[in-house]
Amino acid sequence: MRTKGIHHLHLNSLSVQGLRNLQPQLLQFPERVSLIVGENGQGKTSILEAIFILSHARSFRVPQLRDVCTWPSQGSKLSALDVEGGISTQDGEKTIRCLYENGRRNVFLNGNKVDAASHFYGQLCCVVFTPDELQLVKGAPALRRKFLDRLLAMLDTAYIDNLVSYQRALRSRNSILQGAFKRAGVEKELAPWDELLVRYGRAVTKARRALCQGIHELFVKYYEQIIRELEGSETPQHQSSVEKVSFELDSGFLDKKKGLIEADALLQRYRDKHAEDIRRGLTAVGIQKDDLLFRFNTGSGDRDARKSVSQGQARSIALALKLAATEYLIQEKGESPILLLDDVESELDERRRSALYEVISGFESQVIVTATEETPQTKSHLGSCSVYRVKDGLVSS
């Protein structure tokens, strides 16, 4: 992993049209820290959403881009979403544009249409901290899979192709299973899709396992750092000398020793489930059920963190995971990602905020923060920063 010669990724400009309640506008951002202040519902989170769309061609708030489009006025045509950004990268100046119109999404890099997702992901790396994503520990497994997928999409160009191929094969297999009990010879129809699920599922699992192994030590480091910040303010059992956390990838494609199961054995597992899948009309085996299992130990043995930790502890774990992902991105890409912090001030107590900002200040990344108000505490945490205000979807400095 590279640790020297880190390049500072920088979003210079952001042009937004047709995104929620934001008015069409062009924004300029400084290289270091920006604070966007506004009441709820005025559009401050939508600014971060626009940046995230440039990074992932999708929103962190809703599953479909159509759900972020501004509602058209009566009698007008369907609205189009058009987001474009100018960025400085280690490869030079670039422009990225995401256009969604007539139900279709198109992505452009330096004015040229990008057809393969693997050619787009990783151009603009960003890590987002939101109130929802602070539920990584106690939320649904899909949240944790999404965390892994987003991070790997920015790191590994082959990963997104393998994941998309797996998802397509899964949809096709499930389509066959719907109403399959009424037809003969269904198992023969399933066979080629079983093979594709094994091929692409093993590739995805291998990448997910390597990522988890790569960030685990960083995760433990950041959790201990956050807990040290809390010492003296919470009860002794929460102190870093006692409190330990860990996590592991839980996948049906891994054996008990967390080794990748051979393709033939996985293929047989799919075959063994044919009768059950036909009866249920759904695929029972696969990486679509993967999860991250967090373990929590205060000296009396490992426990399932999802069931045993407090809300504050869960947020500390989620923060540590996000910070570990940020450092891992820096190490692997040699480029600091943009950090997007959405209203974390309202979700974190003072000491957790202090720990978060202290770590972030050491990354030398471009940071864009939203808050409902500019307070002395916020200014103290962020130091020198550019302040913007948003009202009725319009940003002013």
Image (cartoon, grey):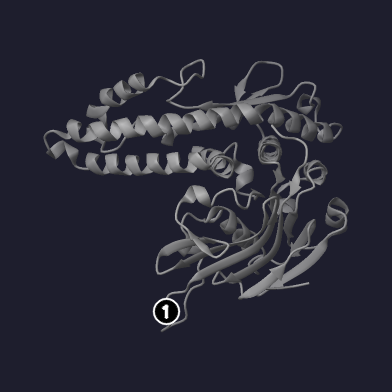
In this image, 217 relative to 191: left or right?
right
In this image, 384 relative to 177: left or right?
right
In this image, 245 relative to 171: left or right?
right
**Percent x, y of residue 370:** 72, 59
Residue at horizontal 20 percent and vertical 35 percent from the top? 189
Q: Is residue 55 above or below residue 278?
A: below
Q: On the image, numbered disc 1 is attached to which residue?
A: 77
- Closest to the observer: 336 or 259? 336
Residue at horizontal 61 percent and vertical 75 percent from the top? 23
Tell me the quarter of the picture where residue 186 sits: top left
- In the picture as drawn, the residue positioned furthest to the bottom comes out as 75
Q: Amino acid at mark 1?
A: Lys
**Percent x, y of residue 32:** 80, 56
Residue at horizontal 43 percent and vertical 82 percent from the top? 76
- In the picture as drawn, the residue positioned furthest to the left comes out as 184
Residue at horizontal 59 percent and vertical 66 percent from the top? 84
Q: Quarter holding the N terminus?
A: top right
**Percent x, y of residue 312:** 70, 38
Examine the rendering and report whether any part of residue 142 can be seen: no
- In the picture as drawn, the residue positioned furthest to the front comes out as 91
